[in-house]
Image (tube, helix red, strand yellow):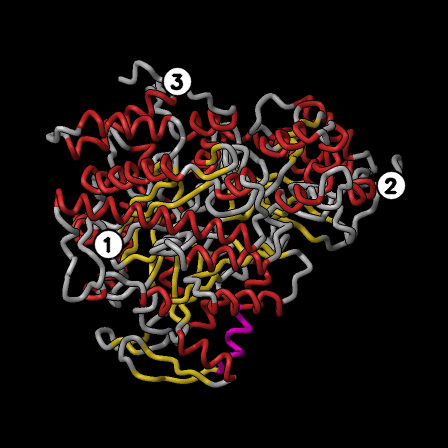
Amino acid sequence: MTPDLTKQILTQTAETVLTRRYYIKDSTGEVVETWETLCQRVSNAVAQADKKSKQFEALREAYFRMMYHLDFLPNSPCLMNAGTGIGQLAACFVLPIEDSMDGIFTAIRNGALVHKTGGGTGYSFSRLRSKNASVRSTQGVASGPLSFAAVFDTATETIKQGGKRRGANMGVLRIDHPDIMDFISAKEDQNKFTNFNFSVAITDDFMTAVEAGEEYALIEPSTGEKVGTLNAHAVFEKIIDLAWHNGEPGVLFIDVANRDNTTPQLGDFEATNPCGEQWLLPYESCNLGSLNLSNFVKNGKVDYKRLENVVQVATSFLDNVIDCNVFPIPEIEEMTLKTRKIGMGIMGLHDMLIQLGLPYGSEEGRTQAAEIMNFVREKAEARSIEIAEEKGAFPAYDADINDYPARRNAALTSIQPTGTVSMIADCASGCEPYFSIVMVKNVMDGDRLILVNKHFEQVARKEGFYSEELMTKVADSGTVIGHDEIPEHWQEVFRTAQDVTPEDHIRMQGILQNNGVDSSISKTINLPNSATREEVELSYVLGYKLGCKGLTVYRDGSRDQQVLNTKDSEASEQQTALVSSAGRKKSLPDTLSAKRYRLKDQDQKSVYIIVCFDENEQPMEVFAKFPFDNRVDLKDKSTMWTTTCRLVSLALRFNIPASEIIKQLDRSSGHMLDLPAQLSKLFKSFMAGTQHGFASICPECSGTLVFEEGCETCHECGYSKCS
């Protein structure tokens, strides 16, 4: 196969991600695949749907080249499972929860089967009767949706998705459910519902009531009767407050989504997948893939001819995935085959705009993005109509109801998270701007490695403003903005996610939603740490007015248990020495604030690191806690970790400079997941400044997570909290 193949050179990061998550391993854990053989495995498996066709060999070859050259990549379950014994290739599902014990625990069982095969699930809890509502069968009262959401959360925690993808859920409750206030506040404590994203399903009537400052009705789902009212603006303010506090709950504009429901005769949308880009009917699944737009710019212009060809091949590929899929339960297979929805998305949008010299936050940039997405949608539909002529339209197509041509797929496009696949493709994720242009990576013995965005380095060298000194300055400040050495035009083109205004983030999402996106978009509206609640409210209102189907707002630094990802040089000078003078032991007050970090050791066992801070947010004490301290076989390890933490705490209290503590920890590290390495990463993060880039600690590699596409993702190892 492919004798004339031009070898595709992947980045070191791509190879690391593939090795950790995608390549098949033998019984000893040794990798037995390469990028070439992985692409062969996937293309051969997906082409089997056309095994009897005269086009079989040509399709298999086209699928292979499209993936191998990184023009298009399917979602992670397809890359992981195609051609293996698992065979479950879909990424996202929505499962119904009926208002009965049998219905609830059937949903839990079905969710476990989905998670086991690598899928994410969306649930609407809106059908469940409210807390204290009567239950005639038992003469008792209901415990409410949140009590059962906790059961779903616990079940998800138990399921390990083949060691490659963790369980992820979206929990949705309608704004008119009587328990809505409890739901809105449910994740204020971030140690609860850790396997869920929560979103409120907001109706048009509610938004009208917000604008008018009126009351709106609460409806008991078990009876359909009005059971009370709430002031719409007060409820909206509570949503805003919690979103400002830590980014949850998100909002889903459910009526906006249902207006675009292509099969209303089958039911209404109730929920989305975990990251919000797929509105699905109960038991539907969706097969996703993303075009790498960075590969379609030639001589400063979009190569539309080549893009059209890849869109056509990718549409056939995604449609075939449905027929090759091994579905986790019969109900999902039945519903998926009825509608045959696919989700062709994009990644590398920012790369494309950079190559075209267009700022992401400009009107020109948005116009170009809309043109591209419309083109993708147009060509995907044309190919879907051709496939329908060959194989038949999706079975739920009804010419009396549907005002569009008979096609193979009820939905064609969405914009989904591409965290790990965009790392393989070496491009910006989804429709997001780059999170950083120049990064610092701390390596052994306190050395710093400067990582420069490939486009920025190319432009800087070509235009003569590249220098190691400038790259260091950009890394330390976390932004290209404000550096006189960089021409103003390129400062605008290379604005990062934090440099783009919230309004420009929302306007990009809005214009894409209304130009070529059938389902929805997974995107984060980044706000500075200084953003007010009023600015969060304006973001939600603008998003609704622009026709967005859902929004995730994230205020920089608003999550607990966070460390810093990039740093400001002025702040660094103030904080590099965490203490001002050595040799005098600090006394500890009776009360210290603390943050807990859940990490993994070399054996993939959870270890909790607790760091206590003084009033200036400087670390003062460190503790390690094993969940299984009482186990004899872990006693020595637990003792070693405890002793190391005591010594680090003592060094802190004696004002030993953090740089010296880090140096000793790095010298003691034998493995990236051992305690000295973990503590070193923590302290390096504490030494950073506060301008940009707050993110949680990666539980797999102890790197830092960034919040994008509605989820936290590690750019070092490819871990994603949502997949």
Numbered tag placed on residue 6 in the rendering: 3
Between disc 3 and disc 2, the foreground one is 3
Residue at horizontal 61%, vertical 45%?
Answer: 496
Tag 3 near tag 1, CB within 8 Å: no
Residue at horizontal 33%, vertical 72%?
Answer: 142
- Inspect the image, locate mark 3, and give the three-letter code of the amino acid beneath it: Thr
Nearest the camera: 329 or 538?
538
- Inspect the image, locate mark 2, and give the three-letter code of the amino acid beneath it: Ser
Residue 390, located in which quarter of the rendered image? top left
Tell me the SS state at disc 3.
loop
Q: Which tag, 2 or 1, sits closer to the chain's start?
A: 1
Numbered tag placed on residue 410 in the rendering: 1
Report the residue that reaches farthest toward the left: 52
- Inspect the image, locate mark 1, and give the three-letter code of the amino acid beneath it: Ala
Cα distance between the residues tagged 3 and 2: 58 Å
Residues packed near mark 3 inside 10 Å, few (<14), some (14 to 19) or many (20 plus): few
Q: Tell whether 29 sits left or right of 225.
A: right
Q: Position of residue 156 (x, y in %)?
A: 37, 48
Q: Tell whether 424 sits left or right of 653.
A: left
Residue interval drawn in magenta: 231-239
